[in-house]
Image (spheres, rainbow, N blue to C red):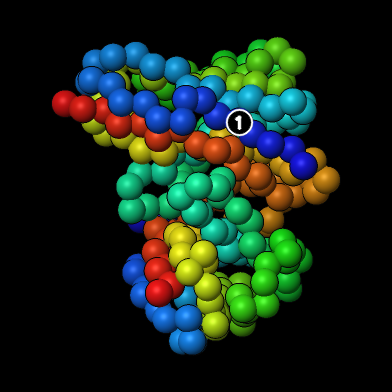
Amino acid sequence: ETGVTQTPRHLVMGMTNKKSLKCEQHLGHNAMYWYKQSAKKPLELMFVYNFKEQTENNSVPSRFSPECPNSSHLFLHLHTLQPEDSALYLCASSQEGRWGEKLFFGSGTQLSVL
Amino acid sequence: TQLLEQSPQFLSIQEGENLTVYCNSSSVFSSLQWYRQEPGEGPVLLVTVVTGGEVKKLKRLTFQFGDARKDSSLHITAAQPGDTGLYLCATKRAYNTDKLIFGTGTRLQVFP
């Protein structure tokens, strides 16, 4: 148990669907992250939130919309995705979002876009 | 953009064998982290190395940071099936002092 919980674990959606990924951390951390892991690319940082404020948007297409209502919860809203968006989406948290801080990852949501 | 190249990309060995995986860059690292990701799970931090030439041991795992801080290695002695997973190195992005970039990964399979 890493203290970071992601739901759902698996998601299949059509290109016209709207869905949301949820992440919850029980570690009292102040920073939360979304990463994308594809089969053929290194782990890619998508978004960073520090104290509920977005501090990083790594040139992510607008069909991915993050939301951080509080320091414990992070969502990734998905709409009109493309098949190439199929990947493992990982949420992580850390104490202050600084380098050297240990990142705690969730188990991920395996997303398939048909 | 700083790239982290890991080798080998895939490695399949028998239980009891030794192995070494590598993480290299053309840039100097300020420090480097190693993670292991087991199938169906997220990455878990194994170690952070900071000083050039530093060696850290974690049971059967030995981590070494190159003297010039441009490379690192992970050596596993007497591998076990439980060592199976994706090994990732990570460091700071060159143009951002706070955020991690990850290497290409080494996928290890240890057969009983």
Residue B7: give x, y in percent of width and height: 51, 25
Displayed quadrant of residue B19: top left
Q: In which quarter of the image is the N terminus of chain A?
A: bottom left
Left or right: B23 with respect to A50? left
Image height of A76 relative to B94, above or below: below
**What residue is drawn where x is 72% and y is 41%?**
B92
Residue that numbered label 1 is attached to: B5
Displayed quadrant of residue A96: bottom right
**What residue is drawn where x is 27% and y is 33%?**
B82
Residue A41: give x, y in percent of width and height: 55, 47
Q: What element carries label 1?
A: strand
**What residue is drawn where x is 70% and y is 45%?**
A99
Left or right: B98 with respect to A29? right
Q: Which amino acid does label 1 sit on?
A: Glu
Residue B31: give x, y in percent of width and height: 69, 31
Displayed quadrant of residue A109: bottom left
Q: Quadrant of the C terminus of chain A?
A: bottom left
Furthest residue toward left: B112
Nearer to us in this view, B82 or B106: B106
Instruction: Sort mark 1 into few (<14), some (14-19) or many (20+) by Cα contacts within 10 Å.
Output: many
Residue B98: give x, y in percent of width and height: 75, 49
- In this view of the protein, can residue A68 be seen by the observer? no
**What residue is drawn where x is 58% and y is 26%?**
B23
Nearer to us in this view, B13 or A70: B13
Left or right: A83 with respect to B96? left
Q: Which chain carries label 1?
A: B
- In this view of the protein, can residue B104 be seen by the observer? yes
